[in-house]
Image: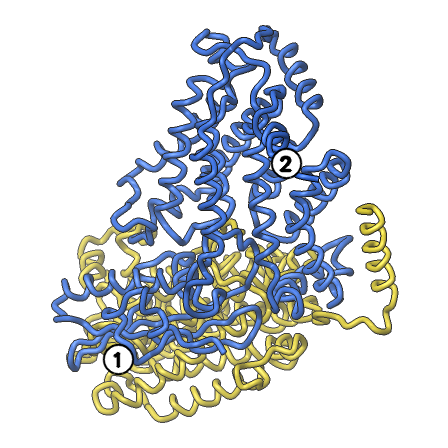
Chain colours: A yellow, B blue
Amino acid sequence: MWKSFLLVFILGLFIFSCDDGGLQKVNDFDQGPLLKNLGNQIILPAYQSLAEQNHLLTVAVGALREAPTAASLADAQLQLKLARLAWQNCSAFQFGPAEDAGLLAELNIYPIDKNQIEQNIADGSYDLSTLSNLDAKGYQTLAFLMYGDPEQDVDILSTLTEPRLEYLETVAHRIDQASQTVYDAWKEGGGDYVSTFSSEASLGVDLGSSIGKLVNALNQDFERNTRDGKVGIPVGIRSLGETIPTASEAYFGGYSIELLKENIAGYRNLFSGGQGVGFDDYLEGIGAATTGNEDLALTISNQFDQLELAIDQIADPLPMAIADQKSDVEQVFVQMQILVSLFKVDMASSIGVIISYQDNDGD
Amino acid sequence: MKPDIGRIKYHLFDKKVTIAPLVTFRILFGILMLFSVIRFWLNGWIHSQYIEPRLYFPFIEGLRPIEGQGMYGIFFLIGLSALMISLGYFYRIFTTLFFVLFTYVELLDKTNYLNHYYFISLVSFLLIWLPAHRNFSLDVSRGVVTSISKIQVIYINVIKLQLGIVYFFAGIAKINYDWLFNAQPLKLWLSSKVHLPIIGWVLRYKVTAYIFSWFGMLFDTTIPFFLAFKRTMPYAYIVVVIFHLITGVLFPIGVFPLVMILGTTIFFPASFHEKVVNWLSNFFRYSRRISVLGNAPKTNMIFLVAFFFVQVLIPLRYLMMPGNVFWSEQGYRFSWRVMLMEKAGDITFFVEDGDRKHMVANYEYLTPQQEKMMSTQPDMILQFVRFLEKEFEEKGFKDPKITARSYVTLNGRPSRPFINPEIDLSKVSLMQSSRFILPYD
């Protein structure tokens, strides 16, 4: 009896499978074009631009050290800003080569430790790869030395002694190197991670798949660095309501909100895939919906609009915005929080990515 | 015809059979557990699960991992016990040690709860009381116990029953609307595997998810019976192997498929096990002293009945709890709900003291895995709230009010609010779950 049951079952399976016409597919989305587009048109150009801008920054800082004038200072300051803007389009991609190179730690850890920096400069010898110097390098360190504390009115050019200039160049050089390493690892002819990224073996949604890595990395970056780092922590959401304006990303340069806008634009570009296939197409392809049975891709896109509207209500410098219009800044945070949920819960779950930054068994 | 109670009792309990199946089970169990411990260790999970976290979600309040590197010692002892169980050396001591330490580790953090760990705790507990070391063991060689070749059949049947309970309740749990009529979460899971070679193309079709769902339910509920009957056993075992290999390929379930594939060999005919043990004895030049005279221990029937009766009650306890068991998870664990739902969430806590309001960054306190598990499981949410309450009282908050904003998605449905954002979670207990968990429908 049991054997015949099994036979019928297998037969049924066979008949079902052959009847192509009446068969509905679960998920017709092909990840290949998505990964090719994201890799070649979004991630690789972003890292290329970052490497170029960081190199120009190093050149400008070198020129400043060579001849510290108002003109060379202004040029270095401008290059610093351009490099930081380029970074905003890369922050979501801290997996693979960037993770191996410790790119984030080399470029954009803030707030910095001013005392540690002054100590290093006074000592004249320092190893910036050590853990104790984690808060004494990166973009904000350059900004601190090139702008000085906005609270104090000093002629910054006169403070730029040779030991400070040397420190500037050392830090800029490290930034240059790290981003070049990551770009080389990604590009064709280099490490060619861009091909690995969209290869057959990287398809799927497991922890080791490209989508798995990307979605986990972007969620982690958006929650910790964009929502909390750029807005939440300065506006005091994490410090019993007490604001910490000095924790702003561009506290010394005074363009934190401009960086935030670029970062959000970068995220939006990643989501839409620029001119090509993006996460929005992925979500539409698998018919992902929200509670109100609305299109999830559209809901996320609308939430980007809301967030951009909220950001348009505030203006640089961020510490001033926090002092004068705190509730508007908090509103930016609230809009980002909604986006975090949409990314972390709805999007990740719809495409089947388990949000988990560590490997483990399930049951 | 009147059922002959005496005969049934004889066939299920008292009949004397060869001890060989129990011996091979002991050896396999020990080797497999040793392998599991080594795998766990090499994956770095001892550190990431029991050393790295700042706080834990224990099943028993106050239970903590050993400080520093102590947990490596615990895992070493578990591995050593597994090896000794396999060898049958100081068997009673090492089965007890294995059970106690393994269960201790599993009770440390709900984050790491897995049904198959619960299964291993139960089996190792049973092994303490079974005479699995009474043949082909070092304990026999060194003469502390006499060798016996026949035991009461009940000693083998308890293991079969234990395995049967796992399958049967896993099958019963699959009889629910989402599983059978929406083919969820399988539709979701399989759709993410369509790129796999060979089997990928077939996973592309909705009907595959339905077939897998129904087959899974039928397999789980019936396989214990097909394994138990001599005539169907060989076919059933082939299906067991295929079933677990497929689940092993499709899902990240670690050693579980191997545990079941090897564990169910207990259903093989006694003659097969007899051959295996004989072969092993020859290979290791171990002389199996033929002695039927050793006195097999008496079974404590009341104890056995109670042990299994409780196991039937535990999976059914959810019936007495409020809310949908998949949503509120009241009575979800320890019930063989294996790979049954896809749940993800995001929860943000707010701590208030008058005008002061603070948002908690979960990642400052929890590992990603802990955060993921906590965000959908109410008892863990309350444990975290208790931790936050203490943490913020130390920071000078007087009687902090703790609220949460949360979204959870279940089986691919759009996310919806999970915890009532108005409720001060520091003032509720799990018994009042219907007060703070928002209804599912």
Is residue A360 shown left or right of residue A247?
A: right
Q: Which mark is residue A235?
A: 1
Residue A352 drawn at (x, y percent)? 58, 65
In the rendered view, tell whether residue A102 sits above or below residue A93: above
- Whether residues under marks 1 and 2 lie with C-beta atoms below 8 angstroms apart, the answer is no
In the rendered image, the quadrant that contains the N terminus of chain B is top right
| Amino acid bearing label 2 | Thr
Residue nearest the observer in this picture, A327 or A290? A290
Query: What distance separates the C-alpha of mark 1 from that of mark 2?
Result: 60 Å
| Amino acid bearing label 1 | Val
Please give the name of the residue rendered at 47% of the width and 40% of the height, measured from the top-left corner.
Answer: B40
Q: Is residue A194 in view?
A: no
Residue B73 drawn at (x, y percent)? 35, 32
In the rendered view, tell whether residue A190 sits above or below residue B119: below
Residue at the far front: name it: B1
In the rendered view, tell whether residue A297 sits above or below residue B274: below
Quarter of the image where one finds residue B46: top left
Number of other residues with Cα within 10 Å of mark 1, as a class: few under 14, some 14 to 19, many 20 or more? many
Please give the name of the residue rendered at 23% of the width and 70% of the height, measured from the top-left corner.
Answer: B427
Number of other residues with Cα within 10 Å of mark 2, as a class: few under 14, some 14 to 19, many 20 or more? many
Q: Secondary structure at mark 2?
A: helix
Quarter of the image where one finds residue B370: bottom left
All told, the count of numbered labels is 2
Residue nearest the observer in this picture, B280 or A157? B280
Residue A20 drawn at (x, y percent)? 86, 69
Please give the name of the residue rendered at 28% of the width and 55% of the height, measured from the top-left corner.
Answer: A133
Please give the name of the residue rendered at 78% of the width and 53% of the height, measured from the top-left corner.
Answer: B198
Residue nearest the observer in this picture, B127 or A306? B127
Q: Is residue B338 in view?
A: yes
Q: Chain of mark 1?
A: A
Residue hosting label 2 = B264
